[in-house]
Structures are given as C-alpha cells and as structure tokens.
Image (spheres, helix red, strand yellow):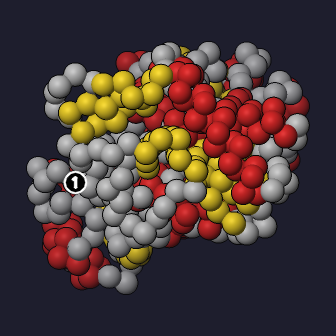
Amino acid sequence: MPARIVLQQADITRALTRISHEILESNRGPDNLVILGIPTRGVVLADRIGGLLREISGTLVPVGALDVTLYRDDLGRNPTRAPSPTQVPPGGIDGKTVVLVDDVLYSGRTIRAALDALGSIGRPSIVRLATLIDRGHRELPIRPDFVGKNLPSSQSERINVHLQEIDGDEYVSIEESGS
Amino acid sequence: MRHLLSTRDLSRDQAIAILDVAEDMADVADREVKKLPTLRGKTVVNLFFEDSTRTRISFEAAAKRLSADVINFSAKGSSVSKGESLKDTAQTLAAIGADAVVIRHGSSGAPLVLANAGWIEAAIVNAGDGTHEHPTQALLDAFTIRRRLHGPASRGHGLDGVTVTIVGDILHSRVARSNVWLLTTLGASVTLVAPATLLPIGVDEWPVAVLFDLDEALARQADVVMMLRIQSERMHAAFFPNAREYSRQWGLDDGRLDRLGPDSIVMHPGPMNRGLEISAGAADSPQSTVLEQVANGVSVRMAVLYLLLSGERTLS
C-alpha cells in the first residue's frame, strides 16, 4: 500500500496554531511557560509553537530542547543512538509550566524518558504534553494535553512526519511498513 | 564500536562522533543532578596493572555518572602478585559478569589480546598499554583543543588546519602515539620535538614533521604545545645527560612560555614533573589546559562507555 498523506502543510500549521491557543487558554496567558521540544522533530515544532505564542500573546516564551536518549529504557534493544544537545532556556524550568512537544505520540516511552530527563535539570510546577500526532497504542499511563490530530493506526503501519526545516518538504503520511 | 583499543583504527567520522557525544556528556556536569540512568545494571571493571591516578579516577567517575557499577582492580594486592595469568584474571571477570573492562597494562598489546582471545565477551577499553596507545587520553586532548577553538559550537568540527607540537619523551609515550594518529585523522598537522635519543625507530614513517630544537619549533607559533612527561620508570638507559640539561633544552620554561602566541595553548597529560619538562609558571598559566583536560577526560570516557555499552550486543 503506498503512503497516504493525512496532513498537508496548511493542516500542520492550523493544528499548531490551535495547539498554541489551547496552551494559552489552559495556562491563562503566556506567563511562566517554557516550551521544550524533544529531538529531532519535536524541537522544530517547539520553535514554531514558541513563535506562534509570541504572535498571539505578544510575549516572548522561552523555548528549548530536551534530549531523552540517555534516559531511554530500550538502549540495550536498539542500535546505539547518538544523543542530541539539550538546551535549557536561561531562566531554567524550576517552578515553571513546561510544555513538552513531540511529533508522534505512540507507546509513551519517549515521554517517560523525558519526564526522567526533566527531573534531572530542575523541578517544574506543571508538565504538559503537546503532540502533533497521537497514533494510540500506549504502553504506559501517559496522555497528551494538546493533540494536533488523532490518527488511529495499526501497529504494522508507519507514520512519517516531514517538516520543512529538516526534510525540505512538509506533510504527515501513513503507510504499511515494509512496503 | 565493540572495543576501543587504539586511535589508529578510528575513522574521522567515528572520532568526531565520540567527541560530539562527549559534548552532550559535558552538559551533564552543569546540571543539578550530575547523573544519568543510562548504564544502570552494567558492570565496568577497572583492571589496572600499572599505577594511575587520573585515568582510573576518571573512568570511575565516568562509569558512576552513567549509573554503572564499578569494580576497581589493581594488580598490587591481587592474585596477580601470586602469579595469576591474564587469562585467568579475564575469565574470573567474565564469571563475575563484567560488561566492560578498562585495562591498563605494562605490555603493549595486552588489551588486544583480551579483546581477541575469547576469554571474555565484555567490551575492552585500552587505558594505556606499554608504549603502544592511550586512546582516551588522545580523545580528551582533541576534545580540549576543539573546545578552546570553537567553544560551545564545537559539535561536528574536526581539527583541520590546527598545528600541534608535541615535545619530549616520544619514545616511551603512548600518549604521543595515540595523539599522532588521532590528531592527524582529524586534520591537524603534528610536529614532534625531542632529543634524537627519545624518538622511536620508524618515526619517519609517521604522518608528522620531526624537529630536534624546541626554540626552532616554538618560533613557528603552533596553536597547541603539548609537553610530555619524562617517564623515568621506563628509562633503563641514559637518554640525556641529566635532568637540568634536558630542562634547559627541551623544557617549557617561563621564557619560552612568553614567546608562545597569545592564543596558543599548553597541554600536559599529567602527572607533571614541575621544573623538568614544564615550569610551574607554564603549568599554572591561563594558557595551560591541564585541569580542563582532567575535567574533559570524564566527559570523553562517559562517551566511550556509552557508545560501547549501549546498543545491541552482538555475540561474535
């Protein structure tokens, strides 16, 4: 089965804009927010959400990157991964409302690792989760607060997220893996 | 990467990958919690047949920062002094369940034997073998040079165009050998300076320039001057008339320090013989990276242990 496009560039932009509004709504404004993207594509999405929050609220919201590679529980089951840099905004995360941003939410194991990673750089007062795609099949009690699109999928399918900054084109597609 | 035995068989991409992971590990040192859960449940054995302060402590700190369990073994006070062979020691460690063995040995090639003999499945890290190699020292030196040059934007960079002068006891120095291979792989040009008696046979086949006069070498304003320790424990013949003469001709004293370029850095792998190969003034100057090298050593060794111990272990 060929890859089927489920989100075009404009859909992705609309989803991120809605997520940004929802973040401001649930936080009652831009104060105390920190947006942290999970590498690789979560960092790009976090940057865009940061830009949108600024456009909407007129306030600069700190944006950073949180690498979770060294906190994963599957390091012994997969080929060695190179970690990515973690960038904590200058104000730190202590007492802040941290919004984690990732591209696809699947088993929830990445987010578990992210929560551990957060714990070693500080103590946020609230942690929320934003994801562009929620494809289901959770293996841990983790649930997103802000979702771009719910995409029911079978575990044999693969979701591809392409973003302009990394891939040179932009869409979300779903395909049968191995095809 | 299965073992780290020498820098000679590292490709440029592999070397840069290790240094980049070390950058991520260095960030951990600035955190509130200086510990990662990455190697929880793994056992790292420090197998030291030769004395060492900083290398053993550094490997121990690196393993502990990654949450591995560390067993320290030094030949003194062990069954080795009762005549136990390397094979039996290795099999004992295998039975204990070591995942990585960091070995320092007086015989060149001991880590290679351990890696290939089939006595133990663990990842082997060479922490200095005889006069052969000391790969993690060279990696931390390259890391230190790269950080001084590029600061926080070091990731992905090699050492292209950097000029490095290595001075002193090249003959007995595994640090010099590892650095020659690694630094040239990364694109640096290396000059060795030593009395003719302290240069190994076959040095003309190395990818380096050789000079005998330190002042002539310093006049070329190298970016990096790396002083080596005079290894009196390995010197069983007269290689130079006496310490004072060596110091006058090949030591980095205060006068020579003044003649270095303002951005040149002075490196020493430690332990230093102050007043012999390096003066106290040079060792403690702002150009000296001696303590940075020690701090960076932990990050680099964390990177090496991470790369060797994470990922699927394929049984050979």
| Residue at which label 1 appears | B313
Q: Which amino acid does label 1 sit on?
A: Arg
Res B208 visible: no
Identify the residue at image location x=77%, y=62%. A96
- Which chain is home to disc 1? B
Q: Nearer the viewer, residue B140 or B174?
A: B140
Residue B221 falls left or right of residue A117: right
Query: Mark 1: few, some, or many residues within 10 Å (few <14, many ≥20)?
Result: some
Q: In this view, does B118 lie above or below B159?
A: below
Q: In this view, does B92 lie above or below B132?
A: below
Q: Residue at x 41, y 59 (%)?
A: A109
Residue B150 seen anywhere in this rendered image of the structure: yes
* The image quarter in which residue B215 lies: top right
Please provide percent x and percent y for residue B226: 64, 36
Residue, x 80% and y 44% (percent of image)?
A: A61
Query: Which type of secondary structure does the marked residue at label 1 adopt?
Result: loop
Residue A54, image x and y in percent?
81, 36
